[in-house]
């Protein structure tokens, strides 16, 4: 995909995340001088072409009172991982769920989920519920509670800034 001037300008607008307001795409559209639909369409193009591979929000859960944050890791049979992961992700208290490859001799876990809660007692009860409901009690697992909060930042996209010179010379950046 060749990036247009609009794509470059949109990527620049997204560098620091979406505006925090009821209609963030409308704010960006106003800045770019296009319609809100135009922003959404250009963003869809960037996502569909793999130039933006992850788009979501960062929620600062500690500021909202969620102090007990547990990463639950499981070693589940590979043929079952996708189904268990989908079931896990549907639980209302699971905020993130993904699969990773094991590291032989170092880290035997392949299925991860995050549970954010206001207190450890509640989170532990949710973990017990999840492991019982999904029949994970006999599978190797660990629960890792966060001890400190690291900086959470939006992804940084590295498009070459749009200039008439680099467009005329055929140089196109990628996000």
Image (cartoon, rainbow, N blue to C red):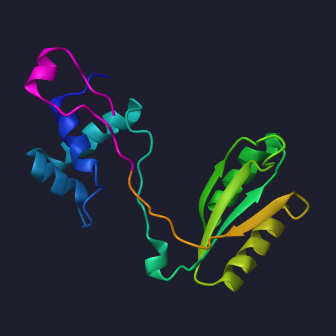
In this rendering, the answer to whether 163 lies above or below 136 is: above
**Residue 126 drawn at (x, y percent):** 71, 75
Work out whether residue 148 can be spotted. yes
Front-lying residue, 173 or 42? 173
**Residue 88 drawn at (x, y percent):** 69, 59
Residue 163 inside the magenta-drawn segment: yes
The residue lying at 66 percent from left, 59 percent from top is 113
- Magenta segment: 155-175
- How many discs appear? 0
Residue 89 inside the magenta-drawn segment: no
The C terminus: image quadrant:
top left
Work out whether residue 92 can be spotted. no
Q: From the viewer's perspective, is 76 left or right of 27?
A: right
The residue lying at 12 percent from left, 45 percent from top is 32
Q: From the viewer's perspective, is 95 left or right of 87?
A: left
The N terminus: image quadrant:
top left
The residue lying at 12 percent from left, 16 percent from top is 168
């Amino acid at each position: 995909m060749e990036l247009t001037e609009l794509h470059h300008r949109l990527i620049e607008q997204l560098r620091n995340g979406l505006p925090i307001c009821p209609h963030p795409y409308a704010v960006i559209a106003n800045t770019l001088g296009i319609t809100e639909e135009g922003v959404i369409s250009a963003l869809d193009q960037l996502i569909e072409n793999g130039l933006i591979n992850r788009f979501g929000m960062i929620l600062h859960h500690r500021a909202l009172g969620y102090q007990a944050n547990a990463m639950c890791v499981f070693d589940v049979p590979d043929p079952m991982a996708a189904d268990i992961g989908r079931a896990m992700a549907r639980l209302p208290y699971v905020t993130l769920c993904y699969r990773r490859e094991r590291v032989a001799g170092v880290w035997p876990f392949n299925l991860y989920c995050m549970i954010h809660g206001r207190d450890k007692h509640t989170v532990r009860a949710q973990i017990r519920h999840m492991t019982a409901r999904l029949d994970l009690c006999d599978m190797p697992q660990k629960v890792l509670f966060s001890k400190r909060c690291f900086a959470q930042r939006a992804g940084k996209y590295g498009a070459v800034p749009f200039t008439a010179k680099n467009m005329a010379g055929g140089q196109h950046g990628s996000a």
